[in-house]
Image: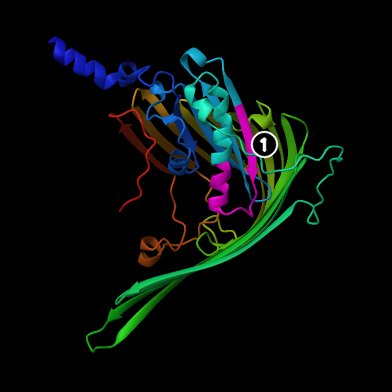
Amino acid sequence: MDIKKLSLLFLFFFPSLALAQSDDKQTINVFLDCRGCNGSYVRSEVDFINFVRDQNDAEVHLLVTLQRTGSGGWEHTLNFMGLGYISNKSHTITFVSPSSDTNDLMRQKLVRHVKLGLIYFLTDRAVLSDLNVNFFGTLDEGTEETENTDPWNSWVFEIGASTSFSGEQSRGSTNFRGNFDATRITDEWKMEFEYDRSYNRRVFRTEEDDGSTTEDIFITENQNFTSLIAKSLGDHWTVGGYSRIRSSTQNNIDLSIGATPSIEFSLFPYEEFNKREVTLRYGLLASQYEYTETTILNKDSEFLWRNELTFRADFTQPWGGVYGWLDAGAYLHDLSKNRVNMGFRVNMRVLRGISIFFDGRYSLINDQISLPAGDLTEEERLLNLKQQATSYNYGGSFGLQFNFGSIYSSVVNPRF
């Protein structure tokens, strides 16, 4: 390979080295790692630094993560991490955008905090002399801090309803969905109450030889009420319980009522959930079942106890993220009636400009106690009107992304 080809290959894989110091320390290069936020808006509004496309070209890695608050807003955590020769300079900014904020107001607040956080890294850059600080608040000396009063006592309510429909000459469908939620989340308590109902109606039309039209109508309905009450016992332990009331034409359940006292252990302090989280929960479910049709076990109703074990692991790091889970359960009267659900999701950068993402899930199913006796009709199979017997299910995906070219990505052009 001649010198010219070697030079081109060098520039392709290491453009940041060729461009290093080209700005004579005017500003800094920042890699924006926006997980759930509007990255394009941030790039268009923050114009005094260089946004770069790859982490290897950056002097600062800005990782933005979002977490839902108990009142329905969003907590933003901005981790500013110095890289290379400034790896010893890092800091974190956290702010909350309440549920009353519009999307535009929320992204404006994000941009304002991004700008404030970046100033820390510009003390030795020429661009600092071109920046101004504007203060729009007031500082009243001698004013005592007063505690905010909340007439709702941290309770948040939500009511929703939706419908959708579609059709053509030979078929049509109509869907209705409604929900009511009530939550109260504080540092010590977490309470959630949720009710939702869905209705799905499908019509198939057949034109007969005599010109008449016949219709076949299929309806599925589901109702669920769930509640959660959890009490904090410090940085690593939580006690509480779930309850659930439901009915489902698809699952042959006319009515089921259950409650699950539970205890959970967190390997890391709960306050570190934005970066790492590993939890293990055990619960004991007591349920009464009333079936629409007699089941394959010749039951019309029954009361059962069930063990439940849940494991969760979630890591959010500058190189990407890893999430995994395992849910296991078995009925106490017959441990062979059990189910294990497991899965994972990985998103990571492996080399310069190369990212991979993949996920998978698998379930071992031996607990379909509500299956109706008798054979399913062809319509019930094809339209999934009734739960069908299976001993497993699985799914997964894999993807690869390769970026190359200019290292800068500050310009946003919305045309077309």
373 on left or right of 139:
left
Q: Is residue 370 visible?
A: yes
x and y percent of residue 163 in the render? Answer: 49, 69
Q: Report the residue that reaches farthest toward the left.
A: 2
Above or below 181: residue 164: below
Looking at the rendered structure, the secondary structure element under dot 1 is strand
What is the quadrant of residue 131 in the picture? Answer: top right
Q: Which residue is drawn at 77% across and 31% down?
A: 234
Mark 1, Cα crowd under 10 Å, few <14 / some 14-19 / many 20+, is some
Taking 139 as reference, is 215 above or below it?
Answer: below
Horizontal placement of 133 versus 390: left or right? right
Percent from the top left, x then y, of residue 386? 46, 61
Please tell me whether residue 237 belongs to the stretch shown in magenta.
no
Residue 104 on the magenta segment = yes
> Is 175 placed above or below 169 here?
above
Instruction: Say which residue appears at 60% left-offset and 24% top-offset.
Output: 91
Q: Where is residue 175 in the image (x, y as percent from the top left)?
A: 47, 69
The residue nearer to you, when weighing 171 against 36, is 36
Say if 17 sits above or below 206 in the image. Answer: above
- Magenta range is 92-110
Q: How is the image coloured?
A: rainbow
Observer-nearest residue: 250 or 344?
344
The residue that disc 1 covers is 282
Examine the rendering and report whether any part of residue 292 can be seen: no
Give x and y (percent) for residue 293: 54, 65
User: In the image as oriented, which residue stretches furthest toward the front?
Assistant: 129
- Picture quadrant of residue 402: top left
Specify the quadrant that holds the N terminus: top left
Task: Return the residue nearer the eye: 57 or 189.
Answer: 57
Residue name at image x 15 percent, y 15 percent: 5
Amino acid beneath label 1: Tyr
Number of numbered discs on residues: 1
